[in-house]
Image: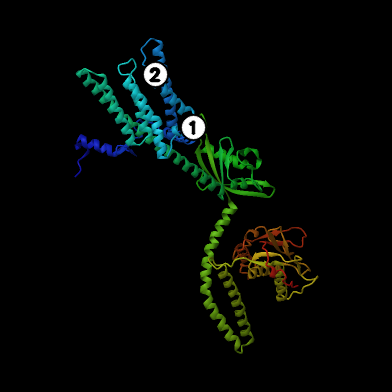
Amino acid sequence: MDAPPGDRRPGDRRRGDRRASPRHAESSWFGHESYFDPGWAGGNPELDQRLRSLWSQRIVGAEDSALTRIHRTYAAVRAAFGLALVAAQGAGNLFGARVSLPLTLVCIAYAVQAIALWLLPRFQPLTTPVASPPLRRRQWLATIGVDLLAFGALHLMGSGGPINYSALLVLPVLMAGAMSTRLIALATAAGVALLLLAGAWRGSFDDGAIAGSLLQSGLAGLGLFVIALLSGELAARLAREERAARGSLELARQQAQLNRLVIEEMVDGVLVVDARQRVRAANPAARALLVDSGLSPPAPFGLDSRPVWRPLAQAVARALADRDWPEAGRELTLSFEPGHQRTLRLRVRFVRGRTPGEGNAGEPLCVLLLEDVRIAQARLRQEKLAAMGRVSAGIAHEIRNPLAAISQANALLLEDELAPAQHRLARIVADNVDRLKRIVDDVMELAPGGPVSPPLPVDATAEVGCTAAEWARTVGLPLGPCSRLQVELPAGPLGVGFDPEHLRRVLVNLLDNAGRHASQAPGAILLRVAAAGDTLAQLVVASDGAAIAPEVEPYIFEPFFSTRSRGAGLGLYICRELCERYGASIEYRRHGGDDSARNEFVVTMKRSSLPAADTSLPLHP
């Protein structure tokens, strides 16, 4: 049973506090985990984060690694120590102190070797980090080894002199811990400790003085071991932090590039606007929504630079003043030309940017998410149509069996002798059964997940000519200069990427639609096929019927929408779906005035090269 908080012993409470405190573990040379509590100084977390970010940028922005800089600094320090030793010998000689010639020669030789390693390019591999073990051994001998030899000689030969050289032995031990492995660093510290003990024993002749000198040298050797371990630990930690900083900044750079790519490819527009109505960033979708056609100028630009953007600028000012905006957004309208408007749904998110010299208080920014209302409504309609298509396909599949039974039973009735009134009713049943069969076939063909045939190279000239002739014969329409149907075809073959049967069906649907609404005048229906550049071809079916009303035009390609009481409303919808299967498009164009082609449907298809055998297809009138 746990004791209540007031009954806990002090030791338990301290252990509990240690368990509750957040600690960050790092690997250590000492065989256990070292911990660092970031809150020990009671600092500002945001400031700490900024300092870490600046430190990471400084590390990554540096040309050389930390280990390289340590090697170069070590080479420069050795040269400075060599000059200082030579200067010390010269100063001693100048002031009348007794200077040993061997000591002077050792100082001069060390200074020459250190300066040569520092300045001459041929010795640069000995003063930079290397990965090759033989080269690392040569590097250790040329730097730390020479230091041990020179400083050890100065310490032994200068014992009892005016200058104490024992402090110089700290440098090779320190650098061995930073530049070598742990074993070599400890071996270097052990060698220097033995050297200090040897110097203490050699320079003392009194038993009491020998004991004191040996104890002092032993303590100094112990300190050298600590210096070697600490310098190695600090060097390893610096290398780990440098690798982590480079890795973190690289990940941040990749994430920034990914975010930029995602924003650039977004369908919705994104604008970043400050309090001065200045757009700091804009993706291509937003630039397309701000103008009638094309793209607006790239950021930065001011929302008050064009009158058409005034509603957007007023919305930004209102949002920044109120610091509040509906989650679902608001709609606003941009008027470009007389009669041309674009309604946008505007959603706003508030952020605070940082500018130099402002500290933590930055300028308020608005992130505007723009969406064309028409595109959003079309996307919603597409989702509803997809759901309705799946339901319709299931219903159509279930209708087939009873419809077949009705058709068969009605056919048996027609084989018998019936009264004229009953025979007329049976014919009405047969006609409506056929109509239902066509509707079911259309729904099943356009059902989601149905098989899609790959586009084939089709000669549009020959295919359209044959289909037009067959349609004219089916509806009893004579062909000729005075016919209602006028056909304009290219002089030669024109290859397009389409399925032949589906192209025939699109054309028949458009001709049926034009035949119902066109007048009986010659040339009331115009069928034209022509190339539209090197990559596209166009199929145009125009008629002189009454123009489609503007309030009806947005819905003519939707399924089950028809202005006729007996129409299923699937003809134009089937045309659009079949065109989209093969990368083509269909659009309606309305022409006013007395133009004979008031209603024009244009199918734009991708051109495709025809095989050699298909270029000689006969053209039927």
Which amino acid, by three-letter code, is at mark 2? Thr
Whole-percent x and y of residue 335? Answer: 65, 46
Which amino acid, by three-letter code, is at mark 1? Arg
As drawn, the label of residue 122 is: 1
The reply, left or right, for residue 227 in relation to residue 530 is left
Whole-percent x and y of residue 620? Answer: 74, 73
Count residues near mark 1 (Cα–Cα under 10 Å), then give few for <14, some for 14-19, many for 20+.
few
Quadrant where the N terminus sits is top left
| Residue bearing the label numbered 2 | 104
Quadrant where the C terminus sits is bottom right
Between 15 and 32, which is closer to the camera in this rendering?
A: 32
Do we see residue 362 in this rendering?
Answer: yes
Count residues near mark 2 (Cα–Cα under 10 Å), then give few for <14, some for 14-19, many for 20+.
some
Judging from the image, what secondary structure is the residue with disc 2 in? helix
As drawn, the label of residue 382 is: none
The reply, left or right, for residue 181 in relation to residue 555 is left
Residue drawn at the location 67% of the way across and 57% of the way down: 550
Between 31 and 483, which is closer to the camera in this rendering?
A: 31
